[in-house]
Image (tube, coloured by chain):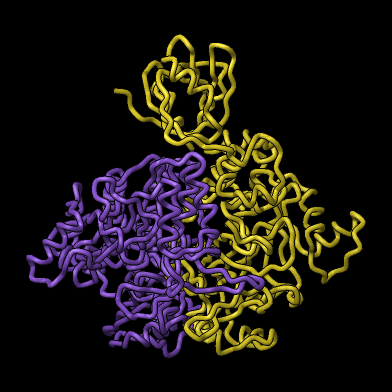
Chain colours: A yellow, B purple
Amino acid sequence: MAEWVYIREIADYVGQDVILKGWLYNKRSSGKLHFLQVRDGTGIIQCVVFKGEVSPEVFHLADHLPQETSLIVTGTVRADARAPIGFELAVKNLEVVHLAHDYPITPKEHGIAFLLDHRHLWLRSSRQHAILRVRSAVVKACRDYFDNHGFTLLDAPIFTPAACEGTTTLFPVDYFGDTVYLTQSGQLYMEAGAMAFGKVYCFGPTFRAEKSKTRRHLTEFWMIEPEVAYCDLDGDMDLAEDFIVYVVQRVLETRRAELTTLERDLTKLEQVQKPFPRISYGEAIDLLQQKGVAIEWGADFGGDEETLISETFDRPVIIHRYPVANKAFYMKTDPQDSRLALCMDVLAPEGYGEIIGGGQREDDLATLQAKIRAHDLPEQAFSWYLDLRRYGSVPHAGFGMGIERVVAWLCGLHHVREAIPFPRMLERVTP
Amino acid sequence: MAEWVYIREIADYVGQDVILKGWLYNKRSSGKLHFLQVRDGTGIIQCVVFKGEVSPEVFHLADHLPQETSLIVTGTVRADARAPIGFELAVKNLEVVHLAHDYPITPKEHGIAFLLDHRHLWLRSSRQHAILRVRSAVVKACRDYFDNHGFTLLDAPIFTPAACEGTTTLFPVDYFGDTVYLTQSGQLYMEAGAMAFGKVYCFGPTFRAEKSKTRRHLTEFWMIEPEVAYCDLDGDMDLAEDFIVYVVQRVLETRRAELTTLERDLTKLEQVQKPFPRISYGEAIDLLQQKGVAIEWGADFGGDEETLISETFDRPVIIHRYPVANKAFYMKTDPQDSRLALCMDVLAPEGYGEIIGGGQREDDLATLQAKIRAHDLPEQAFSWYLDLRRYGSVPHAGFGMGIERVVAWLCGLHHVREAIPFPRMLERVTP
């Protein structure tokens, strides 16, 4: 009796009879031969149905299988140098589990709206499959990095009472009569965690009621946020750099086949090595002006400016010390220059924009209180956060990295909507 | 120049001078000696300040340090068999980073409301620290299990358009003018994923607008949900059993110190070995009746019944094949007995209640459509879900496991509120 195996492990069964359970991805015929491309979620293998080796019923059946029909195939594993995976299956028997009539996604070109409407089926396409396999490897690499570097995972809450950076992009929720908000960042909670565990991280969904349609924004996206006690801006940049290099290397090791399916230029990713260039905000302004951009000190960078800066380098670039006025209240002011905040962003190369934002946090109670007032924020809501400066305050720093932007960069995607299984955007909350 | 090290790695530095950066957890004095218990998030070490070995200023300072003051200690690591961690630090110098006056959580007894109000500080207490270290190990073990068994992580969306099990416990959100809901389960999305990847799991926060106050409920909790194509109820039970045994063993291996801090009876956890007893719903009813419970076939189990059943066994028990009428529309009816659903729950031992719920899903299109109508659910909202039965439907099964309940069980907690960093309950959404 043959054993049920997955295509991923087929190399271990050469010469043996096995059972595959999967779906028909594609097929072609030539007289006495039917070639069935069968997928089982772990790979695609060509199953060869030869008229002389199966019953007439099975041969006839193989000629009339609609795309995405679920089926159980029994056959012998053969090495075949011409096959994309190096093996094929000589079919002995075929059993249909369920006939799929008129599968809506065909090899022809479909519009993006149609594909997004059929996201639950589009996931089966080899390109989407590859992207989401890369995503799973990115997530694992991120978690492994922090788990292996002495960080404790500390999940941040999703329901948050306070609005950290204004309410215009917040989703309010009626919480048994009170208004709470869906989190935009776990940072404030991670600061509490860093004082308790030294090094912590959270990794979960965050929300932004983003009304603009851009190729870099989702309303629901996943973010990983480490926070370290007794860490300054330099230590924070070191951490971000080491982390990104690790994640890229791990993805190159474990998802090379998927990146190849996506026709990604791997040499670009192999260049992601330490050290990353580190330039100040002022230097970035100079760089943009040299490139002919009409921008003055004090202005924010938009997507176009980020692209221009990042294209100058062959690996991620860290920009540090932005103007205080452009940054959130919790950023620590540079003691060397009170116009500047001890913060940093990491821009991905090839125009993929900001993937990390972070910095050193204000750790002085009176200064933080003054900043909260200056930003017109409700001090009462931040009372617990101020406690962290009342009881054993220490220098500390951290950052947040958006997963979809990293996946888009590593996979070479034009839009982040393909970097998450079920994207949510301004006009899309289905399926 | 001494090196900054963490207490966790102190054993590597015996006889050497090191720098610790942390907080004062506790202290006592006896004449010429001050004993400072210093924590740095990775452990607690006794730092001995001997009058003859430090400057008079440092000796005086050591006598006047308030609890939770942040400080940098330089000293020599000494092996000491009497010390809980086997080492202590002979202090050479002390530097205060920030004096903490009147830290609100003192060694005296505090009420639970006070502690929850100060959750951001309570995390620093050794018991809470231990619980959340166990939680981090549970999460890692869960992810590693599925990552190492061929599953692809597929994050389910948080914003969901359809209400799967009635709207009374859903949190609605205004999504740019439309009403959507916060997810209660990623299962339907994982079913789409299983058809694309064979074996998938999601792991994220889920939400329940639970109006009752019980020790087993949170409004926001984390759930891991695997789903497997070509899997039946027996395979699902095998998976749940293997998974739980792995998680418990991993926690025993990596968090023994924390479980000891919590005074957990480890022999109870060591008993969690295969095979788990598997009893049908009908057998569970018989068992309860034998124990004198007035319950009839068809009734749901409450917390009391679950406790009575689970106390009968020394390890988790699997209850399978509940009445169809008590279960969600997507459960497959038992072909052997149409009164029963091919579902299963796993109850933790020692009265910790249900930790897993799952089963085989209905895979026939017409049957599922009839069930959706019978449950008065809007068929249009499930159109994409029905597509999974239109195009290559296969038998499939999965389950969901609530992380906080598992942490509560493993740590021996009375209430799940301590099993999550920042618990959200009916009357608690702060800090």
Q: Quadrant of residue A396?
A: bottom right
Q: Is residue A430 left or right of residue B213?
A: right
Tell me the residue at 41%/15% (across/down). Answer: A55
Above or below residue B171? Residue B197 is above
Above or below residue B33? Residue A203 is above
Residue A213 in sight in this render: yes
Tell me the residue at 48%/12% (across/down). Answer: A51
Q: In x, y percent, where is residue A318?
A: 70, 57
Q: In x, y percent, where is residue A314?
A: 74, 44
Residue B72 in sight in this render: no
Q: Which of the pair A21/A263 is nearer the observer?
A: A21
Q: Which of the pair B37/B147 is nearer the observer?
A: B147
Q: Quadrant of residue B270?
A: bottom left
Above or below residue A378? Residue A400 is above
Q: Quadrant of residue A30?
A: top right
Tell me the residue at 71%/53% (across/down). Answer: A317
Tell me the residue at 69%/35% (across/down). Answer: A108
Q: Is residue B141 left or right of residue A271?
A: left
